[in-house]
Amino acid sequence: MAKDISICVGATGFGGGVWHSPDSGESWSRIRQPFPLGSQVRSLVVYPDNPSRILAGADNGVYRSEDKGATWEKLWSPMEGMPIWSMSIDPVDTETIFVGIKPAALFRSKDGGQSWTKLGVQMAQDCPIGPPMVTMLMVDPKDHNTVWAGVEVDGIYRSLDGGDSWTHVEGGVNPDIHGMAISPGDSGRVVASTPREIYATTDMGESWESVVTTDRFPLPYSRGIAFKPGDPEVIFSAIGDTAIGSTGALQRSRDGGGTWETRPLPVEPNSNLWAFATHPADPEVVLASTLMGEVYSSDDAGESWRKLKREFTEVGAMVWVPN
């Protein structure tokens, strides 16, 4: 029997918006208010101090739920009409929220979303495949003054003063950032996923080493990455055949990235594996999504997986919280 959790999925396309399951994915409802029909939701984040509170970032603003995703309210923000791709909440001061958009730019609220400031960091605005987007935002739980931003095709930015000033981390890492994760251990290790390689740094981004190249994986395109909560040795990597491909696979390392194994899924994925969702309330529960709408769930840290019956148009974001 699946563990008792609530799940929120952010979707794009005609069936976009936020979908909510109160029963581990057995039943679902699409949240109609206050999300406009066809909302493109690409970011969901759970408050570190209250799992009942969730933020959603869409192409039409910022939304908040106080009841694990069952109902939502819209927050005022200057990001109206700006596609939101990533968000992060300061784990020490949860009134501080960071938002990353497309074209790449950063916003911050210090009062829980009542007011917002566009941060003075200049990111690339053009690339051959379209405007860059901020694919990842992370506030370091061990030092909340350290904030990381990953930008697709423009690399990694780092702040050491809570977002007031930023440094573009140059060199040593492919600038096409698809995912990032902070190790739950004491090493200060940060990993970054790029299309063909996963990198790691232990010195705040001053230098990077290759963890693995995708020629060691069964499929060549790397996307999302996540650590098992509380265990710096267990890393999950989402891969596929191309950026918008026809199949995907799930990789797991149990030695910090030294060796990898393909974890079998119950069916062949319909597209590349895209992202993961974990929560420290139960490190054994891991969700994985494909780009084209499939969601898989594991209750044993990736040993076995089940596919949720419900399929979505395109999964842009995903979180789960304990009931």
Image (tube, rainbow, N blue to C red):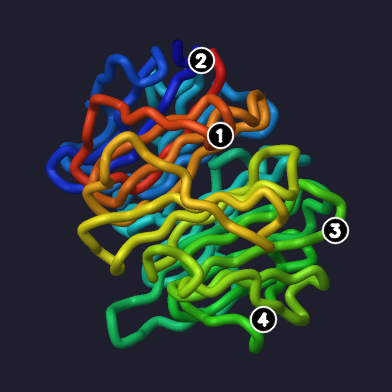
| Label 3 element class | loop
Label 4 close to label 3 by CB (< 8 Å)? no
Camera sees residue 61: no
Amino acid type, callout 1: Val
Residue 299 sits above or below residue 154 on the image: above
Amino acid type, callout 4: Val
Amino acid type, callout 2: Lys
Q: Which residue is mark 4?
A: 169
Q: Which residue is mark 1?
A: 46
Please identify the residue farthest to the left as the structure is shown. Answer: 14
Amino acid type, callout 3: Ser
Other-residue count near label 4 (Cα within 10 Å), few / some / many at <14 / 14–19 / ≥20: some
N-terminal-most mark, 3 or 1: 1
What is the C-alpha distance between the residues marked 2 and 4?
40 Å
Between 287 and 112, which is closer to the camera in this rendering? Answer: 287
N-terminal-most mark, 4 or 3: 4
Residue 47: % across, % down: 61, 33
| Label 2 element class | loop
Q: Residue at x 78, y 51 (%)?
A: 144
| Label 1 element class | strand
Label 1 close to label 4 by CB (< 8 Å)? no
Q: Which residue is mark 3?
A: 187
Q: Quadrant of residue 300?
A: top right
Taking 217 as reference, is 91 left or right? right
Q: Quadrant of the N terminus?
A: top left
Residue 197: % across, % down: 53, 74
Residue 93: % across, % down: 74, 40
